[in-house]
Image: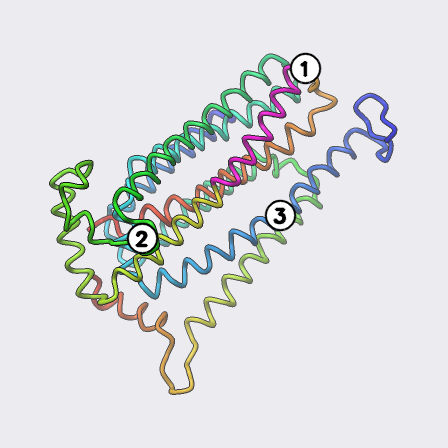
């Protein structure tokens, strides 16, 4: 490909080149919207059909960890936006700094997610043969991380929910399938994003980005913000069902 | 500018958690999704520079949102109004009307 400075041969101007790259990325993101949209639609139908089980499942999630991760991800979106701004204004050291911060926040998110997933395995809340929504209530000694007041509340809620929905355990599995499916796909997107960020970091250390050539930073930024938007929806959908009881 | 946006996003996150603990009946989910949509719009417009993008990029974004709305609206209206061969309504409509009468 012929390339004069930052400009590739098939484009007339840098602006045209940038518009083309951004447009292509947005078209890809629209397909991603439809991808996550379909999953959220399936979630919505199950949530309305088995509301008791979904509310119960949601209340077993840790609001603290989920809320913390929301803040972390929003902050990483902010540092990413700052990285894009730094590249557009040719502040080369700042690009590296903000990209590193974004990666760091991404890793904090993964660590918290790992803690959450491990807890669910521990509490027998992973869909499959050993899934048991009543496990912690029936074996309080095995779930010592839940404090007594929360446990009593959970027991009370489970009794009411089990009366309203005789097949609560099966339907709660549906909720947890949705939880692991949606957060898992979101995490997969973040793994890909983190890989791209490492590549950007390498390039930025080599001093490749400036006001003329910053399309990769911009495009990866769009992707990272999109992953943030997915989480903006996942957080209330998964963590905040019927919390007011 | 970005600092204002991130502060707004964090504040809205706080509000959405607070709102989840207030009993609004079936409007809890409406409020939660409304706040999420405001947050998503801010991210798209400012962080993703959609506000300053060319018209044709904006068209792609709007078309995407429109297509998503079609998917949700058509499928949900089908589920909400479907009657099977016995004349029994699909559970979704029953549960929705149930949840208004006696929530747990």
Disc number at residue A168? none
Along the line of sight, which residue is nearer the eye, A60 or B71? A60
Q: Residues within 10 Å of mark 2 (few under 14, many from 20)?
A: many
In the rendered image, the vertical position of residue B33 relative to residue A53, given as above or below: above
Provide residue A214's location: percent of width, then percent of height: 69, 25
What is the chain letter for disc 1?
Answer: A
> Separation of disc 3 and disc 1 at Cα?
34 Å
Along the line of sight, which residue is nearer the eye, A228 or A100? A100
Q: Residues within 10 Å of mark 1 (few under 14, many from 20)?
A: few
Disc number at residue B28? 2
Q: Residue at x 26, y 70 (%)?
A: B98
Q: Earlier in the sequence, mark 3 or mark 2?
A: 2
Provide residue A163's location: percent of width, then percent of height: 17, 65
Q: Residues within 10 Å of mark 3 (few under 14, many from 20)?
A: some
- Residue A199 sits in which quadrant? top right
> Separation of disc 2 and disc 1 at Cα?
50 Å
Q: Which residue is the extreme one toward the top?
A: A93
What is the chain letter for disc 3?
Answer: B
Query: Which residue range is magenta in the image?
Result: A187-206
In the rendered image, the vertical position of residue B95 relative to residue A76, given as above or below: below
Residue picked out by circle 3: B61
Disc number at residue A206? 1
Whether tag 3 and tag 2 are in contact, CB under 8 A, the answer is no
């Amino acid at each position: 490909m012929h390339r004069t400075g930052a400009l590739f041969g098939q484009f007339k101007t840098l602006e045209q080149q940038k518009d083309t790259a951004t447009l292509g990325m947005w078209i890809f993101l629209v397909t991603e919207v439809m991808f996550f949209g379909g999953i959220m639609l399936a979630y919505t139908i199950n949530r309305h059909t088995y509301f008791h089980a979904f509310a119960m499942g949601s209340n077993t999630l840790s609001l603290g960890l989920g809320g913390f991760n929301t803040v972390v991800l929003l902050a990483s979106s902010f540092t990413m936006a700052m990285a894009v701004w730094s590249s557009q204004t040719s502040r080369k050291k700042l690009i590296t700094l903000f990209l590193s911060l974004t990666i760091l926040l991404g890793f904090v998110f993964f660590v918290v997610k790992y803690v959450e997933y491990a807890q669910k395995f521990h509490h027998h809340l992973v869909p499959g043969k050993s899934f048991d929504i009543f496990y912690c209530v029936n074996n309080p000694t095995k779930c010592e991380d839940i404090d007594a007041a929360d446990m009593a509340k959970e027991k009370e809620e489970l009794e009411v929910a089990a009366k309203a929905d005789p097949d609560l355990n099966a339907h709660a599995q549906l909720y947890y399938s949705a939880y692991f499916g949606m957060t898992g796909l979101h995490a997969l997107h973040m793994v890909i994003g983190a890989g791209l960020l490492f590549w950007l970091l390498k390039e930025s250390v080599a001093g490749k980005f400036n006001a003329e050539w910053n399309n990769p930073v911009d495009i990866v930024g769009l992707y990272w913000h999109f992953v943030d938007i997915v989480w903006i929806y996942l957080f209330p959908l998964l963590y905040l069902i019927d919390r007011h009881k | 500018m970005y600092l204002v946006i991130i502060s707004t996003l964090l504040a809205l996150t706080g509000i959405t958690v607070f709102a989840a603990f207030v009993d609004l009946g079936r409007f809890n989910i409406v409020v939660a999704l409304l706040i999420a949509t405001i947050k998503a719009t801010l991210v798209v417009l400012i962080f993703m520079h959609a506000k300053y993008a060319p018209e044709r990029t904006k068209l792609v974004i709007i078309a995407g949102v429109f297509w998503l709305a079609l998917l949700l609206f058509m499928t949900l209206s089908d589920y909400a109004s479907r009657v099977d061969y016995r004349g029994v309504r699909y559970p979704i409509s029953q549960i929705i009307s149930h949840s208004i009468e006696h929530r747990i």
